[in-house]
Amino acid sequence: METEILKAIHEHQKIIYKICNLYRDNREDQEDLFQEIVYQLWKSYPSFKGASKVSSWIYRVALNTALTIYRKPSVVIDYYRDLPEGIHPSEEKIPEYSERLFLALRTLNDSEKAIIALYLEDFSYKEIATITGLSTNNIGVRLNRIKNKLKELLK
């Protein structure tokens, strides 16, 4: 089990980075969120039934963690001590051309951020609907509105 979750986190770490960059403004907060997401993945992996793709499950956990932690006051808990070595935020920098996009994305509400993040990760409308609990048609409408909003912001 331990190697399976480590492999899944490693293979899909870009998903976690996108969520961290989307929901947190500074590097320190992004690293804290990354650790929290990894902890939640580690903790909840035994209950993962495989009914969805691992990437969908990781996205769902990452989004829920980002949204939950975002609303909670900061609490310092040393639960990272139990995580295996090698699980930590990357030193990768966001390419400069992406910084403007991330700034625009941060202006979106939480629901819009979740939908566009999944879309940018090449999830289908159906997969996005499954993860968010919305209908496929609703996803199409919302994505169209979000894209128009982003076009205006990036002008």
Image: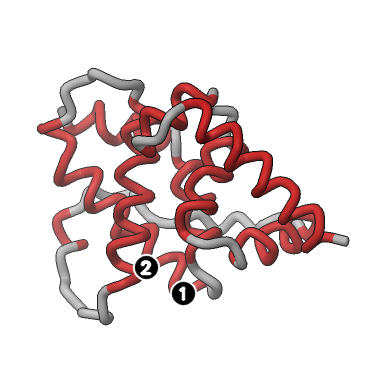
Q: Which mark is residue 32?
A: 2
Q: Position of residue 92 (x, y in %)?
A: 60, 55
- From the viewer's perspective, is residue 136 above or below residue 110? above
Whole-angstrom CA distance, mark 2 to mark 1, is: 6 Å
Q: Position of residue 64 (x, y in %)?
A: 31, 52
* Residue 3 higher or lower than 118, as above or below: above
Q: Please, is residue 46 above or below residue 72 in the view? A: above
* Outermost residue, left side: 46
Say which element carries label 2.
helix
Residues at discs 2 and 1 in contact (Cβ within 8 Å): yes
Image quadrant for the C terminus? bottom right
Amino acid tagged 2: Asp
Q: Quadrant of the N terminus?
A: top left
Q: Is the residue 61 above or below the residue 71 in the image? A: above
Q: What residue is at 30 percent from the left and 56 percent from the top?
A: 65
Depth check, front residue: 147 or 23 = 147
Instruction: Write down the quadrant of residue 143 in the picture.
Output: top right
The residue to which callout 1 is attached is 28
Local packing at callout 1 (Cα closer than 10 Å; few below 14, some 14-19, many 20+) is few
Q: Position of residue 33 (x, y in %)?
A: 37, 63
Rendered residue at 68%/66% (across/down): 103
Amino acid, disc 1: Glu
User: What is the secondary structure assignment of the residue under circle 1?
Assistant: helix
Q: Is residue 94 left or right of residue 18?
A: right
